[in-house]
Amino acid sequence: MTYAVVFPGQGSQSIGMLMGLAEAHIPIKETFQEASDALGYNLWPLVQKGPEEELNKTHITQPAMLAGGVAVWRVWQSLVKTQPVAMAGHSLGEYSALVAAGSLSLKDAVTLVADRGRFMQEAVPTGEGAMAAILGLDDDKVGEICAEAAKSVVDEVVTAVNYNSPGQVVIAGNTAAVNRAVELAKEAGAKRALLLPVSVPSHCRLMMPAAERLAKRLADIVILSPVIPVFNNVDVQAENSADAIRDALKRQLFSPVRWVDTVLAFAAQGIQQVVECGPGKVLAGLNKRINREITGLTTSDSASLDKTVQAVGEAK
């Protein structure tokens, strides 16, 4: 069977993540040590013991999740013969995909995403931005609600930013506008409309100052053509040139994550399995709601990894 590999983003982190895999597979701690050397602080004890509020700081979460995704990918490579035919990552996970595909070095990527996290946090003062999940309304209705909410709160922004699965859309923007949109969604019959525990309104135009700063950092980073196609979040295209990859990563900061379209693009290519490399199983859950003909598989612990290796059927 043909398969793709996907990498989770911010929100899938947890204290103690990947400990079971680390006990069985040397590349986990080796990868975290490589990331730690680049960052100048020891990432693994922080991931294992916390404190949780420190791990959840955006500029720490991002390199931790990137290292986690790459670490599991390296374990996967040691166990499975056949390469995936495509890759993608959800938001931050796109950087993990680019490292796995040989486009970015891990050293460059972890320092880049640490700066990305700082740029994002500094773009909007704490308390002035928010995100919320809207469940049970179609995409067009969520768009209408955001437009109405933005009109109701002068000079503020709220837009749909993550198209995660049919009936599950995340919105982001200024806090007052997001709160207004949540109330409108409830009035419109949403199954759930709830604020998310984040301090950064990702993927909306409030992130444009962060994107400009990120672009300057990207200009100094060596980017190679991926050896495995990586579908980006913005255009759902697999770019080969360094300039096109840089541009997509810049635009990703203030553009919606088109995850539904990404999974549908996999299906159109005849991909039958999608392996989630990294902590958690969020993307496998979304996959079930997008296209049930594609099997979503996870790798976040020894049991799920063993099961997924057997399912792919190409163990070394």
Image (cartoon, rainbow, N blue to C red):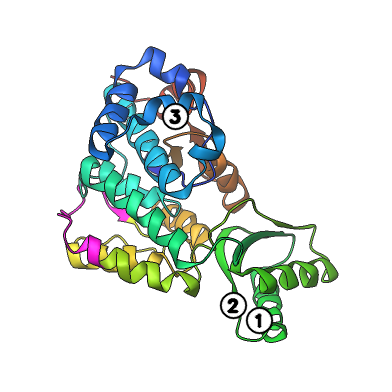
Indicate the position of residue 244 as horizontal and vertical percent values: 23, 67
- Mark 1–mark 2 distance (CA, rounded to whole Å): 6 Å
Residue at 44 percent across and 62 percent down: it is 122
- In this view of the protein, can residue 271 be seen by the observer? no
Q: What's the residue type where badge 2 is placed?
A: Val
Residue at 27 percent across and 67 percent down: it is 215
Give whichever of discs 1 and 2 has the lower sequence position.
1
Q: What element carries label 3?
A: helix
Q: What's the residue type where badge 3 is placed?
A: Leu
Q: Residues within 10 Å of mark 3 (few under 14, many from 20)?
A: some
Residue 241 in magenta stretch: no
Residue at 45 percent across and 29 percent down: it is 47
Q: Which mark is residue 46?
A: 3
When the figure is inspected, residue 224 is found, relative to residue 171, above or below; the finding is: above
Q: Residue 150 carries which label?
A: 1
- Mark 3–mark 2 distance (CA, rounded to whole Å): 35 Å
Q: Residues within 10 Å of mark 1 (few under 14, many from 20)?
A: many
Q: Foreground: 141 or 26?
A: 26
Indicate the position of residue 161 as horizontal and vertical percent values: 54, 66
Q: Is residue 192 left or right of residue 118?
A: right
Dominant secondary structure of the residues highlighted in magenta in the image: loop
Q: Is mark 1 on a helix, strand or loop?
A: helix
Q: Pointers 1 and 2 in contact (CB under 8 A)?
A: yes
Q: Quadrant of residue 1?
A: top left
Q: Nearer the viewer, mark 3 or mark 1?
A: 3
Give whichever of discs 3 and 1 has the lower sequence position.
3
Q: What's the residue type where badge 1 is placed?
A: Ala
Q: How crowded is mark 2: few (under 14 residues within 10 Å), some or many (20 or more)?
A: many
Dividing the image into 4 quarters, which one contains the C terminus?
A: top left
Q: Nearer the viewer, mark 3 or mark 2?
A: 3
